Structure formats: structure tokens, C-alpha cells
């Protein structure tokens, strides 16, 4: 099974029957009973994909939504809608990639 961000795991944990992983290339949820696998990536410009999808922690809240904390902010992933919502992003955009501030 190909995991998101095969370069390495940041965090792997069990919540109920689900294995929830946070990687440098996104996050994933694997249900150990049904063996259903979902890859979670934050849609963004490819120039900043490394920052946007470098996920430090992923957890499920009481409503069943997935909360992702990444290199660039915090967002919620709705399993029912199948997409990211309520992003709290930093002000960095694709043109900022590779830029150095002093």
C-alpha cells in the first residue's frame, strides 16, 4: 500500500479502528477492519506543496472531522464532503517559494 509521503512519517496513531498517519507528503487514514485507505492532501500550487502538505499531526474530532496541523497552518478535512474546509493558512503564496527574508 503506497502511503502519502513515502519519505517518512511524522506521526502514526490509532483512533478506534483507524490508523491515522501524518507524513511529509500529506496524511492518511486506514481503517483496519474494512481495509479502506484514504489519502489526504491539501490542494495547493505545486510550488508550495512541500510546505502545505508537510503534516505534523492528524486527529479526528468529536464530529468525525479530521484536523490537520501542517507546516503552514491548520485545516479541517471533511470525510463527508471529501475536501478541506476551514483552512487557517499563513500569508505565504506560491511566489514566496524560495524567497529569503532578512
Image (tube, grey):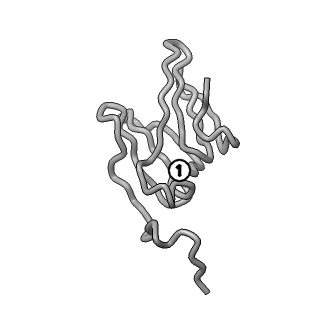
* Image quadrant occupied by the C terminus: bottom right
The correct choice, above or below, for 23 with respect to 50 in the image is above
Count up the numbered dots: 1
- Position of residue 35 in the picture relative to residue 7 (left or right): left
Q: Position of residue 71 (x, y in %)?
A: 56, 58
Front residue of 45 and 91? 45
Q: Position of residue 38 (x, y in %)?
A: 47, 29
Q: Residue furthest right?
A: 8
At 58% from the left and 82% from the top, the residue drawn is 101
Front residue of 65 and 89? 89
Q: Residue furthest left?
A: 81
Front residue of 61 and 55? 55
- Position of residue 91 in the picture relative to residue 49 (left or right): left
Q: Quadrant of residue 89?
A: bottom left
At 51% from the left and 60% from the top, the residue drawn is 48
The correct choice, above or below, for 92 with respect to 100 in the image is above
Amino acid at each position: 500500500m503506497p502511503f502519502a509521503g513515502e519519505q517518512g512519517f511524522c506521526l502514526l496513531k490509532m483512533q478506534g479502528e483507524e490508523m491515522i498517519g501524518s507524513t511529509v507528503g500529506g496524511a492518511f487514514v486506514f481503517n483496519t477492519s474494512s481495509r479502506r485507505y484514504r489519502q489526504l492532501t491539501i490542494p495547493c500550487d505545486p510550488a508550495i506543496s512541500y510546505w502545505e502538505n508537510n503534516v505534523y499531526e492528524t486527529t479526528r474530532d468529536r464530529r468525525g472531522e479530521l484536523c490537520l496541523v501542517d507546516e503552514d497552518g491548520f485545516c479541517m478535512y471533511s470525510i463527508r464532503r471529501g475536501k478541506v474546509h476551514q483552512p487557517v493558512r499563513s500569508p505565504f503564496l506560491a511566489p514566496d517559494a524560495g524567497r529569503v527574508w532578512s
